[in-house]
Amino acid sequence: MLKKSAAFLFFLHYIAFPTLSQKTCWASKVLEFSSEKVIPFQTTEYKAIQALGKPDVLPNIVESVAAWQPSQPDSPHEEYITVGFDTSMAIRQVAIAENYGQGCIDKVIALDNQKKSHILYESPQNQINKVKEKGKMLNVILPEFTNYQVVAIKLILNTDKIKGPNQIDAIGISTSEEPIKAVIRVAADAPKEVYRENLGKNVNSRHQEFAPVISSDGKTLFYTRNYLSVFGKGKDQDVWYSVQDKNGNWVKSKSIGYPINNNEKNAIFSVSADGKEILLLNKYNKDGKLSPGISRSYLTRSGWAYPEEIKIEDYYNDSPNAEYAISPDGMVMVMSIQRKNTTGKRDLYVSFKKEKNTWSKPINMGRQINTIEHDVTPFIAADGKTLYFSTQGFPGYGDNDIFKTQRLDDTWQYWSEPENLGSAINTPNWDGFFTLPASGEYAYICSINASKKEDIYKLELPKTAKPEPVAIIAGSVLTTTDKKPVEAVLTMTPQNEKLKAEIRNYDPATGTFSFVVPLKEKYDFVPYAKGYLAINETVDLSKEISYREIKKDFYLMPLEVGNKGVLNSFTFEQGESHLQAPALKDLDRIAQAMTDFPTLEILFEGHTDNQGDFQLNLKLSEERVEEVKNYLITKGVSPERITTKGWGQTRPIASNATEERRKLNRRVEFTITKK
């Protein structure tokens, strides 16, 4: 069953310093402690090591597993913890993050490099420490710098002063007399107000709606509906969807139907960039029953196919809950699961597609984004770099908040410091299941409404929260002769070798193809279908800087006698006949066609621009098509099946006035002469 996870707080925190000369160090090691809370199946929850590093909770005040908590509340015995630092220095301040049960610290003691103790703070006997405001640090400001180097700080607690649990989240030393403050890490220019639009009765109902998944083009919204129990009937859970009308309004939702929905709990987590593959919770067995795992379904001419299991090496999940997300290129999966090496509760893991339906062993995505709390509902943006997820493991506004981070390399292990999307997006309640289309204009989010029920909301995304801009290239594959759509395999290859090629199976009966690609690049598109020759084309986005939707059709030439085409990849330098790498790829496809059809014969005709001597140009055009013939012979094509003809400069298709136009005349054309 898919369900949101209650969580608390962990890991990174932004500390604002008043001057650049100020130096603050946070505890990096535990030297000793009196006791720590122990719970069944504990990892590092409540342990003394949770007092290390920057504050994980403040300014929020809540009992948290991301803080050190002594074993017994209201203990008559003294509790203590001693922490060390990576750097020894003279200090003006000790900052202590008491995230829960504030006011029980009796003494703050500094230890120098000779292990000598110096009392920095001591509360009056039986008096509760005066905490000015909830959510504030306890700042021990010294009248002057210590005349010794501080290497450790010891806290002595009288937990009987404050009834209930007492927790210490962080301990820092500083050269500044300005009180260290704990604030939520939010982008500096995050908006203070964002309009949140409830999607209304056509999507939301009296039941629980959650896990929204928006298509790349923003026109189809999938989500999961969890039915409330009626007359003792057990809960059920199905996948629903809604589409936008021509005015951009969501029409009344429909159940996605069988085989996705059955009598068990069904849920959707991700949709592919082209909208023709969905990722589903659980394994669908042949008997119709579900078992733990992941499945995917493809859109076919008759509807969604019966879900097939996604096989992940060494996959297991120790939590009853999980969520998953797929990258736009379909090659990377991010999952929220719990395993033996999980930081605390559920962590984010990454798995890479290997072949067909097999994925690599999940790898923990690191402490930069994973916390001691539940890190859940991952979503990979269209740029393939920006990750959104929900957690209570970083300072926030209450329950789970949504955070944004960007990967720093291709390992998916190194990430920018996560940023809270701000109070205009996150609420004091549970926020998660963040999803947005390729445009990044609007986001869809799952939040708890005034009736304490989860609904789906739409909000205009501020610039600071958006991923990098991309383009959607969508269209059909058509024949060159009658312009009718033809079922084909379409390959998109970036000219930037650092980017990966993508393949789409195009079926006219299931709609157009769609690719989501980064801007500022060039992409080569080649369709393939047996009985046809591809007409490859390049889409140039090198000068684009903002989101675009591009309608582009690609063409296949039927292998029929008399059909003629131009090899677009055949570009020659002035006076040269040498074949360049793109041309060889085109010739490889022609060689394959001539292998598939052993009686196929082709005429190749060479052309030049008008620069230089007429006779030399004629000879050059002949040399160019001879190069074509010789290459095909090396691929096993009999020379008798290849005819060549050079026309020199006599048949231009463009003006020769500029170099850009002359390039079009330096070409090779082909004609099917026999099949």
Image (cartoon, rainbow, N blue to C red):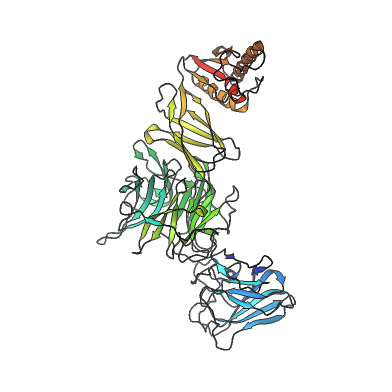
Which corner quadrant holds the N terminus? bottom left
* In the image, residue 664 above or below residue 135: above
Q: Position of residue 362 (x, y in %)?
A: 53, 51
Q: Position of residue 195 (x, y in %)?
A: 41, 57
Q: Position of residue 156 (x, y in %)?
A: 60, 81
Answer yes or no: is residue 209 visible: yes
* Residue 632 in the figure: left or right of residue 357: right
The answer to which quarter of the image holds residue 606 is: top right
* Residue 326 in the figure: left or right of residue 605: left
Answer yes or no: is residue 340 visible: no
Q: Position of residue 253 (x, y in %)?
A: 31, 48
Residue located farthest toward the left when viewing the structure as drawn: 231
The answer to which quarter of the image holds residue 297 is: top left
Residue located farthest toward the top when viewing the structure as drawn: 615
Taking depth in this image into account, of 227 and 250 the one nearest to the observer is 250
Taking depth in this image into account, of 673 and 542 the one nearest to the observer is 542
Taking depth in this image into account, of 264 and 141 the one nearest to the observer is 141
Q: Residue at x 59, y 21 (%)?
A: 635
